[in-house]
Structures are given as C-alpha cells and as structure tokens.
Image (tube, helix red, strand yellow):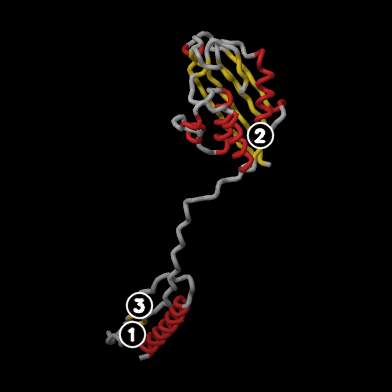
Amino acid sequence: MAAMTTALCACSFLHTTTQKHLLSLSSSSHLSHSLPSFTLNTKCLNNSALKPTNSFSISAVSTPIAETSQPTSLSNSKPPKILPFRVGHGFDLHRLEPGYPLIIGGIDIPHDKGCEAHSDGDVLLHCVVDAILGALGLPDIGQLFPDNDPKWKGAASSVFIKEAVRLMDEAGYELGNLDATLILQRPKVSPHKEAIKANLSALLGVDTSVLNLKAKTHEKVDSLGENRSIAAHTVVLLMKK
C-alpha cells in the first residue's frame, strides 16, 4: 500500500510538472505551429501485480501566429544612376568618292575625293557626336538623325554637334576632355589640325586645351590604306556639373 501511494505521488508530480512546462511553451512567441497532444499512462505497479491506475491526457493548444502580409513586389524600373564621370566612345567610317567635298571637323580640306554620305559626311564630327551620346547612354547618331530622313540631306554636321551638346547640358554634364584619332591615307591632316581644333572647341564650347587630335595612315592596308575610305575614333570624358 505504501509503494502504491508513493507511485501515485510521483505520477501526480509528473502530471503537475508536465502541465506547467506545456503551458509555458504554449505562451511562447517563438512557436510557429501547434504542439502535439501528449498522453501519459501512469502504470504505477507494486510488487504484488496491482492493476494499472486510470490514465489521463494532456493536450497543449498553442496560440495561432498571426499571418504576415506578403511583401509587395519591387518595380524593375529604377531611376538612372547619377555618376560623377561618364566615358563614351565614337566611331565612324565613310567611303571616299570623287565629286564630294572632304569636310573634317567642320573644315573643308582640299582633296580629289570626299565622303559619300546623306549629310555632309564629316567623319570626325559624327564620331564626336556618337561618343557624347554613348557617354550619356542615349541612342546613336543614326537613330537620332536617320539617313532616310530628307531634312538631313546635305545637312552640316555642326547641327548634330549642337544637339549632342544640348543633351549633355540637359543631363547636367560638361566635357572633361576629348581624344580623337583620324585614320586616312591621304591627304595629310597636320596642316589643318589647328583649324579643326579651333572649330571643334567653338562647337563644343570648351577650350582647345581639353581637345586632342591625332591623324594616322593605315599603312596602305585595306580600303583605308588604299584611300577608298576615311575613319575616326573618339573618346570623351564627361563630368557632372
């Protein structure tokens, strides 16, 4: 009888302790799902094969967690990044044919051939425009001034330069420096270099000290070296005002 009383006391203590622990867990804010149901069967037997005592069940019910709202999807469109500096590269090439004027940097250069083009075919100004537009992340000169538009037929390339400068100013940038390379076999550009730089500085609204112009032959290789075409490369650095 004493052994049975001891066993019942032990089971009662276990019941009370388990109930307190489960109630503590139930009130915890860290639970994200319901606790399972627990069933404890107190078979308190003594040495004389006593019948098992009545079983009892404890069910722990957790407080449901409030559903959180789904985050709204972020828009893919982002405002353009404001950079302190922007670099652009321009390239242009024109075929040389008799009967056309050869205009480089707005200067008419005496030669027996000139650039076949929809506008005046100024290879240097065209690639300067493309370099500025490229630095600004804008469409190229062919998209802004398409060669199938009659209004640009024979147009002076200074018009394209002025538009590129306007777009640059509108975006809040100014020209830091410009480096251009002309590639042609003939004629020699060196006698006209200072006039080209002076005209380019006037069109861009900058000092000639930030402009660099180089001219190279193509060592008589391909159409450039055979004086059948002329090309130019330009790199510009734009600075935030």
What residue appears at the point 43 percent right and 84 percent down from the top-left corner? 16
Q: Is residue 211 above or below residue 217?
A: below
Residue 56: give its label.
1
Mark 1: few, some, or many residues within 10 Å (few <14, many ≥20)?
few
What residue appears at the point 62 percent right and 43 percent down from the top-left corner? 170
Along the line of sight, which residue is nearer the eye, 104 or 222? 104
Residue ID for mark 2: 175
For numbered disc 2, what is the local secondary structure?
strand
Residue extending farthest bottom: 1
| Circle 1: residue type | Phe
Residue 133, visible in the rendered structure? yes
Residue 137's quadrant in the figure?
top right
Query: Percent from the top left, x then y, of residue 47?
Result: 31, 83
Residue ID for mark 3: 38
Along the line of sight, which residue is nearer the eye, 12 or 182? 182
Q: Earlier in the sequence, mark 2 or mark 1?
A: 1
| Circle 3: residue type | Phe
For numbered disc 1, what is the local secondary structure?
strand
Q: Earlier in the sequence, mark 2 or mark 3?
A: 3
Q: CA distance from mark 3 to mark 1?
A: 10 Å
Q: CA distance from mark 2 to mark 1?
A: 87 Å
| Circle 2: residue type | Leu
**Eye-nearest disc, 2 or 3:** 2
For numbered disc 3, what is the local secondary structure?
strand
Q: CA distance from mark 2 to mark 3?
A: 78 Å
Q: Is residue 146 above or below residue 218?
A: below
Residue 160's quadrant in the figure?
top right
What residue appears at the point 48 percent right and 19 percent down from the top-left corner? 116
**Quadrant, the N terminus:** bottom left
Mark 3: few, some, or many residues within 10 Å (few <14, many ≥20)?
few
Q: Are marks 3 and 1 in contact (CB under 8 Å)?
A: no
